[in-house]
Amino acid sequence: MTFGQSISTCFSNFANFQGRARRSKFWWLFLFSSVILFVVQVLLAFAPDGFPDSTAFAVTASKIIGIVLLIPFYAVDARRLHDTGKSGWLQLLVLIPCAGAIILYVLWAQAGSEVDTRTGLLRHKIND
């Protein structure tokens, strides 16, 4: 799946927490989100000093962009965990300091299972 297709699919299914997501789809969205947040932070860091209330604007802009990216990321994260045969609720591991994030990175990097976890049957096509 290409970068553009992945981002388009993720934002069109931004609140769909069911189904499966391939590794490429997840990692492209992860890259997209990281780049967007980095660019926003750099732009806000170089905002002119005369910019009215620049600190409040920077905080507000970061929060808005974070919220816009948050729901699609959690949705594709749940679908990615489903593809590895795990529950989407494992996203809550992020609440465990340090270790939770490391465990999630390992789960995200795993290959998808070829067996449908609900039926136990071999699947022939990955649902995007």
Image (spheres, rainbow, N blue to C red):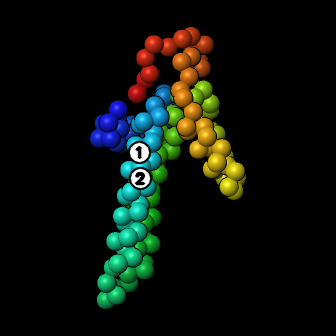
Instruction: Tell me if residue 22 comes above or below residue 64 in the rendering.
Output: above
Circle 2 residues within 10 Å: few <14, some 14–19, many ≥20: some
Q: Which mark is residue 83?
A: none
Residue 23 visible? The answer is yes
User: Which element type, helix, strand or loop, lies under badge 1?
Assistant: helix
Out of 84 and 88, give the one closest to the viewer: 84
* Measured Cα–Cα span from mark 1 to mark 2: 6 Å
- Quarter holding the C terminus is top left
Residue 114 pos. (x, y %): 54, 18
> Along the horizontal axis of the image, is 105 left or right of 20?
right
The picture places residue 127, in percent across and down from the top left corner, at 43, 23
Q: Do the residues under discs 1 and 2 have CB atoms within 8 angstroms?
A: yes
- On the image, the x and y values in percent for residue 67 come to 45, 56
The label number, if any, that marks residue 33 in the structure image = 2
Is the residue 116 above or below the residue 42 in the image? Answer: above
Q: Which residue corresponds to the image point at 43% horizontal and 55% vertical from the top-left?
A: 34
Residue at 46% of width from left, 32% of height from top?
21
Residue carrying label 1 = 29
- One can see residue 57 in this view: no
**Residue at image point 39% right, 57% down:** 35
Quadrant assignment, res 25: top left
Mark 1: few/some/many CA within 10 Å (<14, 14-19, 20+): many
Quadrant where the N terminus is found in the figure:
top left
Horizontal arrangement in the rendering, residue 54 relative to residue 94 (left or right)? left
Q: Residue furthest left?
A: 4
* Percent coordinates x, y for residue 51 in the rendering: 31, 84
Q: Secondary structure at mark 2?
A: helix
Name the residue at 41% across, 61% down.
37
